[in-house]
Image (cartoon, grey):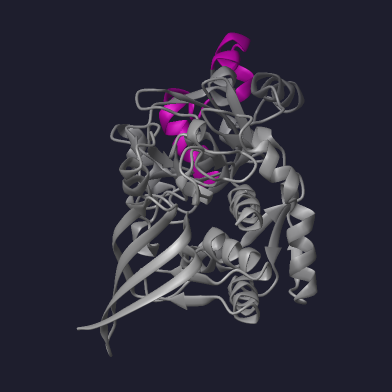
Amino acid sequence: MNSIKQSYDVVILGGGAGGLFCALTAAKKGRKVLVLEKSNKVGKKILMSGGGRCNFTNQFINHSNFLSTNNHFCKSALSQYTAQDFISMVEDHDIEYEEKKHGQLFCVNSAKDIVKMLVAECDKYKVKILTHANTTSVKYIEANSYDLKVNIENKTENILFEVHSTNLVVATGALSVPTLGGSGFGYDIAKQFELKITNLQAGLVPFMFSDHIKNICETLSGVSHGVEVTSNEVTFNEDMLFTHRGLSGPAILQISNYWNLGDSVSINLMPSISASEYIKSAKNDNPKLLLKTILGNKMAKALVSELENLMWKEFANKPIGEWSNHQIEGIGFILNNWLLKPSSTEGYRTAEVTLGGVNTDSVSSKTMEVKNKKGLYFIGEVLDVTGHLGGFNFQWAWASAYVAGNDL
């Protein structure tokens, strides 16, 4: 096995969104930067995001779009590097993008455009990127520097790499989607330096069911419907998607960040409409109609059919004119407040983010440097900062990476 020893001003663990952006930011200042990525290529999560088109930021960034034990922590970084700053970079590289609902910005062509941009900037400023790099140990040297041991293992070589660096940036991501490189390595480093980790759980993740709702979801797999979903006094108005495992779609992913095991979820199937008043109005206009016909104007017929079997099977063939207002109000209430109790989420396997992370009490909100350990930085998802769906987590990656890179 070959052995190589090298020194750098900055070593960054992780070649994802935050790691690459921090690298190019520090390199622009003349720093000698090394990025160590354990998988076979950088930017894997970027490539898979947004259906392969990368929802790279959002027009309406606010600290209220983020969850953290300290809800103020993200403010400084987000103000130092804004969504418009990243949009300007995208425009400078002639990447076509488009705005979708809720201010979400996507590449018109491919998420590859964002990765190519980041790699091109790293190349321009002579950042060295090593893939297949498995960091086996990190050691703090009393002279405010760090020694790392890294195995470089690929088809052509097996090298033991010893690296000395003045600064170490942990941009390893978190536990979500392990097939794209998600791991707890960043937490291990944090614990090594006696930093606390807040409670961790899968976020922006689909729900699963073990009761009769599971069969309904299987039957309706692929059906999407606009809903208002609420849990723990938080509400999102978005689309919900039935899957063969349970419920997904933007509304469910968003609310999963606020749901805890054992909680119920309230789903309003007719947002902004009183279902009972809508049905009563139809009763007055055409009393011969069946309820499924009335509701068929507001939702997919397959969904109405399953709801009928679940909620008013005994009245399925009874014209609405023969329903009492009390009966209508009962069904209307359920349609506006369908209470479901997920048995679990799909977990880290499909979670887009990890809730929780390195406790921000020990980290500077202005620079991402650990307060009592000079030269050690944590950025991106490994920290206890989690954004809503819609480009917010990428903006946190860019912003936290920028302030760290600018401080190096």
Left or right of 59 in this view: 215: left
Q: In this view, does 81 lie above or below 1?
A: above
Depth check: 344 or 177 in front? 177
- Classify residue 372 as left or right of residue 208: right
**Residue 184 at least partly seen:** yes
> Can you give x and y, in whole percent of width and height, for residue 35 in the image?
47, 69
The spot of residue 359 in percent (x, y) is 46, 34
Q: Does the magenta stretch include residue 66?
A: no
The stretch drawn in magenta includes residue 322:
yes
Question: Which residue lies most toward the bottom here?
Answer: 156
- The count of marks equals 0
The one nearer the camera, 231 or 114, is: 114
Residue extending furthest toward the front: 143
For the N terminus, give its image quadrant.
bottom left
Image quarter for residue 227? top right
Residue 301 horizontal side relative to residue 192, left or right: right
Taking the view exactly as shown, the residue that stands out farthest to the top is: 326
Query: Which contiguous range is marked in magenta?
Result: 301-330
Regarding residue 13, the answer to whether it shows in the image is no
Q: Is residue 240 above or below residue 398?
A: above
Residue 4: x %, y % from top left: 32, 80
Chief SS of the magenta region: helix
Q: Which residue is drawn at 48% across and 71% down?
A: 34
Could you tell me which quadrant the C terminus lies in? bottom right
Q: Nearer the viewer, residue 147 or 266?
A: 147
